Amino acid sequence: MPNVILQALALKKPVISYDCKSGPREILENGNYGELIDIGDHKTLQNKIELALTDQLKYKYPYQLFVENFSLKKIGNKYFKLIKWEFYIL
């Protein structure tokens, strides 16, 4: 799991990642929270880095929505539902 992607999103920083076999596509929700670049596409990577350095990518993605997915209230409710369901089937 590429933790650096999670850390960057939590800090509301633009994310540019190669679309590897596992991790980035799931974390970025198919490109909804950051750029996914084909592996080996160095020219596109260069262009996206240049955009990120001028802050043009920062406002393209709803970083706050990503961070809210991991809020105490949302995660707490998910755990509560899981525990309630676990006790229900026992």
Image (spheres, rainbow, N blue to C red):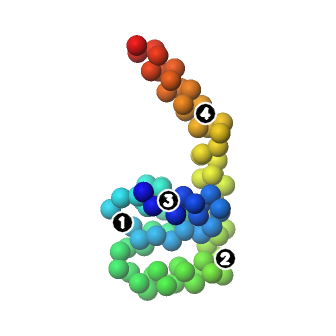
Nearer the observer, 41 or 89: 89
For the residue marked with disc 3, what is the amino acid? Asn
Give how far apart the Cα atoms at labels 2 and 1 are. 25 Å
Question: Which label belongs to residue 55?
Answer: 2
Reading the image, the residue beneath label 4 is 76
Camera-side residue of 10 and 40 = 10
Q: Amino acid at mark 2?
A: Asp
Closer to the camera: disc 4 or disc 3?
A: 3
Q: Which x, y percent locates residue 58?
A: 65, 70
Front of the two marks 2 and 4: 4
- Residue topped by disc 1: 20
How dense is the environment of label 3, judged by Cα within 10 Å: few (below 14), some, or many (20 and up)?
few
Q: Secondary structure at mark 2?
A: loop
**Label 1: element kind:** loop
Spatial separation of the CA atoms under disc 2 and disc 3: 22 Å
Quadrant where the C terminus is found in the figure: top left
Asked if the residue under mark 3 is in contact with the one under mark 2, i.e. CB atoms within 8 Å, the reply is no
Please tell me how crowded label 4 is: few (under 14), some (14-19), or many (20+) other residues with Cα within 10 Å.
Answer: few
Q: How many neighbours does mark 1 have within 10 angstroms: few (below 14), some (14-19), or many (20 or more)?
A: few
Please state which of the two labelled residues, at mark 1 or mark 4, is closer to the viewer. 4
Instruction: Report the Cα–Cα distance between label 2 and label 4.
Output: 34 Å
User: Which mark is on residue 3?
Assistant: 3
Asked whether the beta carbons under mark 2 and mark 4 sit within 8 Å of each other, the answer is: no
Query: SS of the residue at dot 4?
Result: helix
Can residue 32 be seen here? The reply is: no
Q: Earlier in the sequence, mark 4 or mark 3?
A: 3
Question: Identity of the amino acid at label 4?
Answer: Gly
For the residues labelled 4 and 3, the Cα–Cα distance comes to: 21 Å
Q: Say few, some or many: other residues with alpha carbon within 10 Å of mark 2 (under 14 / 14 to 19 / 20 or more).
A: few
Q: Earlier in the sequence, mark 1 or mark 4?
A: 1
**Whole-percent x and y of residue 45?**
46, 80
